Amino acid sequence: MLYVFLNFPTEDFHTPEADDPPMALAKILEKRGIRGNFYLVGEKARRLRRRGRVDVIRALRKHCLGYHSNYHSIHPVPPEYLDRMPWEEGLARLEAEETPGMQDVKEIFGVDRLHIFVHMFANACQVPYVMANHGIPTVLSGVEIKVPGNLAWYVNSLHVQTEGAVSLDGRDEDFLPSRLRLWEPIYRAAAKKPLAFASSGVHPCRHVVKGFVVCRNCERGRSIPESQWTSLPHYSRAQTRGFYQGFADYMDHLRRQKGLRFLTYEELYARVRKNPVSVPLGDVLRLLRATAKGTKAGRAIGYARLGRDYVSAAELFGMAVRALDFYTRTGRLPDPVPMGKPLGPVKDVPLRKSVVMPLRDLLNTNRRVANHLDAKRRLPDSIAAFSGARIGPASYLLALCEMLPQLAADARAASTPDRRVRFAPASNRMDHLIRGNKGFRDWSPYSPKIRENVLIEQAAMQAWTAKPAVFE
């Protein structure tokens, strides 16, 4: 089965004539019984209200609505400040900048929830995390998560990776034939698979305006008042009507194809398995043993299969820490073990040489690690040993992989005099789970001063949270 997402980034708030195309496309879809995904810029929603376009709002409300940032390209866009701020401070700034836009879109369109976030700057891993915290569960970004299938969890949000995408933005003379030439290879490849996802769509403003006026006036970090923006040429009304007809013909072609269904991101999320609240102790111990065995065989730390579900490395770290903390307080391991959703570390602080720590010191240290998970909701970049050494989270997890099964086998093991725990050097990076998070300078509005190396490093560290998502 091939599931197709129809995507419509609705962003041009500057051009009043660009208010009509989203409504026209929404009605074309409605006539055919199809729901599309319209994701709106906050300022676009506010301009629709200000211009009295209740007709547009009503038409789009019948479809799946998402968020496309507060001001789209107006500077600074999030990566231009996230690359220079400490993690928690950057999250607070992002919340302050984007929360009003999310609230305005929901209020103006009269909906309780937005279902998808799409933007070029979703490559900055703080962005999907904040969106998920605001109830926007699904993200499209340029980050490629290297897991089986098309769906992945990353920074606690659902990331969709399609078989291919066909943009309808082009304005060539043979519009329909050219788009079908792009579509047919995707359809044929997907037909060979039991489950596949693809997307197609158009920026509605491109049915009226010859370009992206917001991006054009904000190129390369340029910040000028909107009153001084340069407008772009428009298509004739006849050309616009022709674009609408071409879109309708394209939709009719897709509707006739066998084994194809249209899907909204709201429907997608409803069919994806969610995390269990807790995991039986026996399963946690099996995951810990398997992780220890895998690293001894030369495999990198990563996600693990748990029945029909998956557990990310960050989740396994959190469960191991919680289990040991419970043992310290009660003298026994918990069953089941609570499963939280911590983020990965922010910086790579590797352990350079092996460290040996008395078990009693580890139990006290682990209490601090548990407190860090509670306060920061992420793995620590490093754990301070009483010797002064800094233990990376990978080294810490592998030590718990060895020790917790021993405690489960003999609860008195912790009381053995002079018992010690060894922490060996291990890589905190999970580059094997993430790829392609570059291009922060490829989007024309980005300032050339953006420090993309910082953003790429942060995104790579969050691969601790990466795991496949299961579509049911």
Image (cartoon, rainbow, N blue to C red):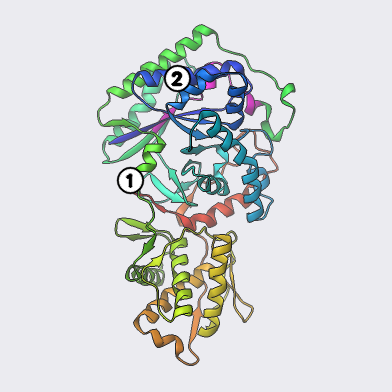
Q: Residue at x 58, y 54 (%)?
A: 457
- Give the number of the disc on residue 348: none
- Give the side of residue 65 with respect to residue 276, left or right: right
Name the one closer to the observer, 470 or 440: 470
Question: What is the CA distance from the residue labelled 1 to the residue labelled 2?
Answer: 29 Å
Q: Residue furthest bottom?
A: 417
145 above or below 291? above
| Label 1 residue SS | loop
Q: Residue furthest top?
A: 238
| Label 2 residue SS | helix
Q: First in sequence: mark 1 or mark 2?
A: 2
- Give the side of residue 248 with respect to residue 119, left or right: left
Q: Is residue 214 magenta?
A: yes
Name the one closer to the observer, 415 or 395: 415
Q: Amino acid at mark 1?
A: Phe
**Mark count:** 2
Image quadrant assignment for residue 444: top right
- Give the side of residue 330 with respect to residue 352, left or right: left
Q: State the quadrant of the C terminus.
A: top left
Q: Residue at x 40, y 79 (%)?
A: 332
Query: Percent position (x, y) of residue 91?
Result: 62, 50
> Bounds of the magenta span?
199-216
Whether residue 426 is visible here, answered yes or no, is no
Q: Is residue 298 magenta?
A: no
Q: Residue at x 36, y 18 (%)?
A: 31
Image quadrant assignment for residue 123: top right
Check disc 2 and report the residue beneath it: 25
Check disc 1 and report the residue beneath it: 471
